[in-house]
Image (cartoon, grey):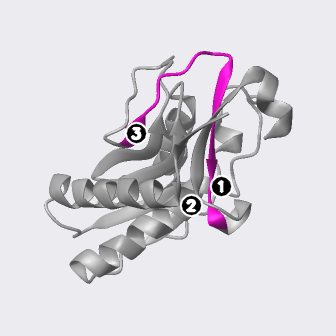
Amino acid sequence: MKEFYDAMAMKRALTRITYEIVESNKGTQDLVLIGIKTRGVYLARRIADQLQKLENVAVPVGELDVTNYRDDRRPDAAKENLRLGVDINDKRVVLVDDVFFTGRTIRAAMDAIMDQGRPKRVQVAVLVDRGHRELPIRPDFVGKNIPTSMQERVKVNVSETDGQDSVVLIKQGELAQA
């Protein structure tokens, strides 16, 4: 197991992502953050807190569970109980997730938000991009690129659920210990 980020490095990466979001969107007007459950929600809230400090504005944060929108689920999975908790119509939506891998989670998230409205723009912010694209989707804001093999996994720990902030690379044989 190899640690890539400790708590301070994670905070710096999220601060950098926050600045990049503000610069790319020329401010925070009509900005909405949507955290992809589970850890993306915590990261989105942290970015919103940073935006509050930086721009003195409360940016809405929604939560999104993409489980029933994934293409590896059965096609008749129920999609009717989706509630983002924020209005996305004509807004600049930033989808926030912990790890970007094949692109399938983000594709599912885009399908889900399109069922809820029509955003002006959709961007993607991730703490870690580990490569291995299967779809032509890439993040707009990245904390760190960590090239991995298919026998490795990136684990993001957040203090809200894991008791600490860190990003670790775990080899297949080490999975049982993590």
Q: Secondary structure at mark 3?
A: strand
Q: Which residues are magenta?
A: 143-159
- Residue 12 seen from this side: yes
**Which of these two is toward me, 103 or 51?**
51
**Which of these two is toward me, 9 or 38?**
9
Question: On the image, which quarter does residue 138 sit in?
Answer: top left
Q: Secondary structure at mark 2?
A: helix
Screen quadrant of the N terminus? top right
Circles 2 and 1: CB atoms closer than 8 Å = yes
Q: Position of residue 56 (x, y in %)?
A: 26, 83
**Which of these two is toward me, 124 or 120?**
124
Q: Which mark is residue 76?
A: none
The crowding category of the residue bearing disc 2, from other C-alpha atoms within 10 Å (few below 14, some 14 to 19, many at least 20), is many
C-alpha separation, residue under disc 3 versus residue under disc 2:
18 Å
Query: Image check: 51 left or right of 98?
Result: left
Q: Amino acid at mark 3?
A: Lys
Q: Amino acid at mark 1?
A: Thr
The residue mark sitting in front, 3 or 2, is 3
Q: Which residue is mark 3?
A: 144
- Residue drawn at x 32%, y 54% is 17
